[in-house]
Image (cartoon, rainbow, N blue to C red):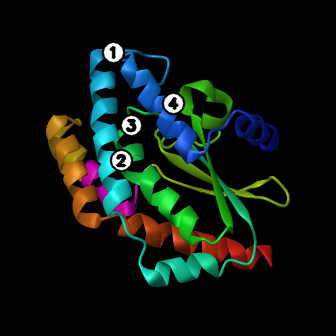
Amino acid sequence: MRKSIAKALFNSHSYSEYRKLVSDLLKDDKSTGNEQSAALTNYSHLNETRMNRLEKTLKIPQENAQKLESLKNDYIWLVISEGWCGDAAQLLPVFDKMVAASDGKIEMKIVLRDENEELMNLFLTNKGKAIPKLIVISRETGGGLAHWGPRPKGATDLIANYKKEHGAIDETAKTDLQLWYLHDKGLSSQEEIIWMMLDLDKEEE
């Protein structure tokens, strides 16, 4: 695993580099990833708008910022993403704001799923390549400590229940999911990830 992580980190992007990469591709009507289609490009355009809005409106509550600042060890968040992914568009701005609130305790690096198959295969969800995936790495050892994703529990439950009732995920489910994220304001993800980080920090002492 350490070798796959090291390889991915070598080819990783900062949050601003990732945003620029996706934007530059969209100027040529392309999306990230191996597959190119009008639908994926359309999703990428939608995601640009979502991320721009979230960057302006998203807030990290003071109590969450204090918990992030209280971390005793230093970490890297290695995130697997793609520009067309709706969940990634909702969650990456949350991760970025959390990193900023951590007062230097956390650094985020982003890699594209299709360019990092070896890494992705280590972090499958129900045998699928669901993204985004946040991998927590010890800055001191370079080893992977834990992972989170592709969605917070509330969003995961919403999709699971919809699939149970309707048999498949369609555009209605996707709309319901985006509305869930809109109302949640990134709070569920913050809470789940912060508890994970505090638990890891105790183990690392």
The amino acid marked with disc number 2 is: Met
Rounded to the nearest angstrom, the CA distance separating label 1 from label 4 is 18 Å
Q: Amino acid at mark 3?
A: Cys
Q: Which residue is mark 4?
A: 21
Q: Nearer the viewer, mark 2 or mark 3?
A: 2
Q: Which residue in the structure is indicated by mark 3?
A: 85
52 on left or right of 103: left
Quarter placement of the N terminus:
top right
- Measured as percent of width and height from the top left, residue 19 is found at 48, 39
Against 89, residue 128 (above or below) is above
Mark 3 Cα-neighbour bin, 10 Å: few <14, some 14–19, many ≥20: some
Q: Quadrant of residue 110?
A: top right
Q: Amino acid at mark 4?
A: Leu
The numbered dot on residue 37 is 1
Kindly indicate whether the residue at mark 4 contacts the one at mark 2 (C-beta within 8 angstroms): no
Image quadrant containing the C terminus: bottom right
Q: Residue at x 60, y 71 (%)?
A: 102
Element type at mark 4: helix
Q: Residues within 10 Å of mark 4 (few under 14, many from 20)?
A: some
User: Earlier along the polypeptide chain: callout 2 or callout 4?
Assistant: 4
Between tags 2 and 1, which lies in front? 2
For the record, the magenta segment spans: 151-160
Q: Secondary structure at mark 2?
A: helix
Q: Describe residue 190's horizontal placement relative to residue 161 as left or right.
A: right
Q: Secondary structure at mark 3?
A: loop
